[in-house]
Image (tube, rainbow, N blue to C red):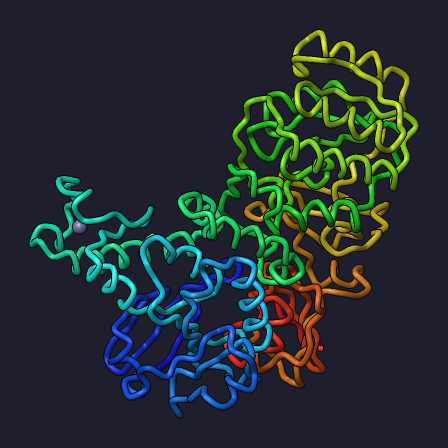
Amino acid sequence: MKTDIRHRDGLARSGTLMDKERTILFPAVIDTDTLFPSLRPMKYTNVPLSADPVFVAAHLKQTGSQPVTIHPALDNPAESKDCVMVANWHTALPNPRQYVNWLVALKEKTPPDTLWYAPACALPSNAHILCYSGFDLFDYRAVDLSTAQKIFCTAEGEFPVPAIKGAGCSCEGCRTGSLKDHNRNALERELVTIRMFITHGQVRELVEARSRFHAPHVAIMRHLDNRYEFMEQSVPVVRNSTLRANSGESLNRPEVRRFRQRVLDRYIPPPADVAVLLPCSAKKPYSLSQSHRRFRNTIASRAHELIVTSPLGLVPRELETVYPAMHYDVPVTGYWDAEECAVVSAVLAHYFRKHQYRRVIAHLEGGAFKVAEMAAEACGITLEYSCRDHPAGDEALANLDLALAGERRLKDDRLHGMCSYQFGIDLDTRSFSVRGRFPEFFYSRNNLQCFSIDTATGMLRPTIDGWNLIPDGYRVTIDNFVPEGDILVPGVENADPQIREGDEVLVVGARAIATGRAALPAGEMLRSRRGVAVRVRKIKRV
Ligand SMILES: [Zn+2]
């Protein structure tokens, strides 16, 4: 059995599993008795998830081959490349808090490059949350049990068979009158959907939608969000897809929380003493929208521009291309609910306590206006107002222009802001020149290109000369060899713990250095034994 993880999206993965003669796409439902013949004589040997260590040690049996049984109370015998099995996982589903505690414990002690099998657990309606939790392999037992109970399974939930008479499902099973085939088909179809969402980096969006039908699923998602330190490690720092912030849970999505946190912890603003708070725009990056063109023309570099937006909080102008600022979509009604107001105003208050401005002008309306007022009161600053509605209208812009009369012009220093956010450094950008057309900018120093903005991810891409200006961090150390392409996991000696999937990194070895993008978070580079660690862009012998 050979597995290849092709895509990761948080804890969820998709890829291929090669058996003797067939290739299976996972997450998958398969007849596991054929895949794992050693399981057949093991029937009725399940040990409950809640069993204590003494009981587990006495009764838990291993098959001696694949899969390897893991248990929350057991020292983990699994190794890289194993398929691991968590029996009775369906009993965890009704207990969200326990589910998450067990899951975190199991994930932390199991090598990441293992395939996860949950026997007798998957239904079309719970497969989304199981895959989101990092399970890859399922069997037909739970749907077959539903068939025996005369239950009709759909991705949205289970219905008693008499209630769906005449519902008109067009699947092969329903055409031939086989409930068993329908239920198996429904699970297979749902896994096709899940694989599609994982491939597109939108499994979270699928889970936010599907979980509405089952309170425990919503609770599992929320409890996992509360395990921020754990979840954040597996969430990529960039994606090519839209982040759809269409539910209340978006406020606590790890990638959204990470953005807010990095703006507050890492970001260094320019030396401006006037700030203007601006509303967001549907078009991203904001600068390309009609309204922001007007704002920028009016402000004419006489103030630091800060965009107030939910769920990201505060987006300084320099960070407008950074994921997910350039990639999020929210339903806009003008109304902000109490939690959005509380979270976003707390970000503003924290920011203005940390960075003092002589003047802060609120050029806002509606919910964003209210949030700015809440923040000003919380951190004790006095806001000036240049409008109360229609911020992009002629009257409001004339007011803003007047308010900024006589203020000195500021250098547009996108590079400095982005470097602080992405690498945590205070780069001296005085001798830099910029060329290109927004957002595709190239930054050079002494005629050497050092950085460019990647238009897909909106992040900075340093060249080797650029890395010379980043004193430490985001390094992957390799052994004494010259890489010929991507860096594979076995070649990695060490990796900066703050590296996440999608980060720009510098590969450092005794015989070569290389620029590239991390394909895995640091923890997985060090705990795995196979796969690509860094997708290399440029190699230089030393
Ligand atoms: Zn059907």
| Residue 275 horizontal side relative to residue 489, left or right | right
In the rendered image, residue 386, in percent from the top left (x then y), is placed at: 78, 14
Left-right relation of 384 to 389: right
Residues 182 and 525: in front is 182
Assign the N terminus to one quadrant of the image: bottom left
Comparing 373 with 514, the one in front is: 373
> What residue is at 36 percent from the left and 69 percent from the top?
137
Rendered image quadrant of residue 477: bottom right
Seen in the picture, residue 204 relative to 17 is either above or below; the reply is above
What is the number of callouts on the image? 0
Above-or-below relation of 274 to 486: above
Q: Please give the name of the residue rendered at 25% of the width and 75% of the height, measured from the top-left corner.
A: 22
Q: Position of residue 251 (x, y in %)?
A: 61, 42
Which residue, as the protein is rendered here, is positioned at the far top?
395
- Relative to 304, does residue 258 appear above or below in the rendering? below
Q: Residue at x 83, y 52 (%)?
A: 427
Q: Is residue 535 visible?
A: no
Residue at left 61%, top 52%? 254
Residue farthest along the left direction in this orientation: 176
Q: Is residue 232 left or right of residue 26?
A: right
Residue 6 lies, in percent from the top left, at: 43, 66
Residue 451 shows in this picture:
yes
Q: Position of residue 29 (x, y in %)?
A: 30, 66
Dividing the image into 4 quarters, which one contains the C terminus?
Answer: bottom right
Residue at the right extreme of this rendering: 358
